[in-house]
Amino acid sequence: MAQKDVVLVSDEAKESMDKAVRSLRAELQKVRTGRASTALVDGIQVDYYGTPTPLNQLANLATPDPRLIVVSPYDKSMIQAVEKAIQASDLGLTPASDGTVVRIPIPPLTEERRKELVKHVHRQAEDHKVGIREARRDALSMLKELESDGAVPQDDRHQAEKKIQGLTDDFVKKIDGMTNAKEEEILQV
């Protein structure tokens, strides 16, 4: 029974840590790098007949070249609403429409903006590391509780704590690797 409880605590901690890594991956995809990526406009909501709707559900998104995103709305009457939503977003992009598609040129990043983006990426990474540490803390407190209830011997708890610390270190390394890769991508001219 004791081993089963320890495995459950460990699995729960691992799932929480994995969730933090997946969340960071999604956040990093939204960070602009100077290259066109449809992930850049994924979070944009368009007013579709009074209902805020994600842009990627209203239009086909494409990147025909590294400096351009092309948005082809399924309903051509939505062109102006799409344009308006892109301008209202905090991405600092200026869309241009020809009546059938919206073109979003991606300007090259300035050195100052690149440094700001790197700082933003590091803040995001640190926030997600905090999530991993919280999962570790919760797991360790559950293990102590199991020990005080008599469900887990002290030796098993110490082994489980080492395992959870190893998981924590592995997930922090994953976050550091993702952060470093994104930083290189941002700083690449």
Image (spheres, helix red, strand yellow):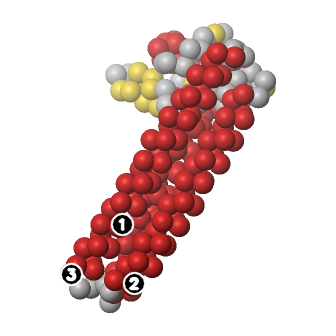
| Mark 1–mark 2 distance (CA, rounded to whole Å) | 14 Å
Q: Position of residue 135 (x, y in %)?
A: 39, 58
User: Circle 3 — which element?
Assistant: loop
Q: Which mark is residue 156?
A: 2
Give, as a three-letter code, the residue at label 3: Asp
Q: Which residue is mark 3?
A: 149
Q: Which residue is mark 1?
A: 139
Q: Residue at x 56, y 34 (%)?
A: 121
Q: Residue furthest left?
A: 149
Residue 72 in view of the camera: no
Q: Residue at x 72, y 35 (%)?
A: 184
First-in-chain label (3 vs 1): 1
Say if 4 sits above or below 183 in the image: below
Contact? badges 1 and 2 (CB < 8 Å): no
First-in-chain label (1 vs 2): 1
Q: Quadrant of the C terminus?
A: top right
| Mark 3–mark 1 distance (CA, rounded to whole Å) | 15 Å
Q: Residue at x 32, y 86 (%)?
A: 153
User: Circle 2 — which element?
Assistant: helix
Give, as a three-letter code, the residue at label 2: Asp
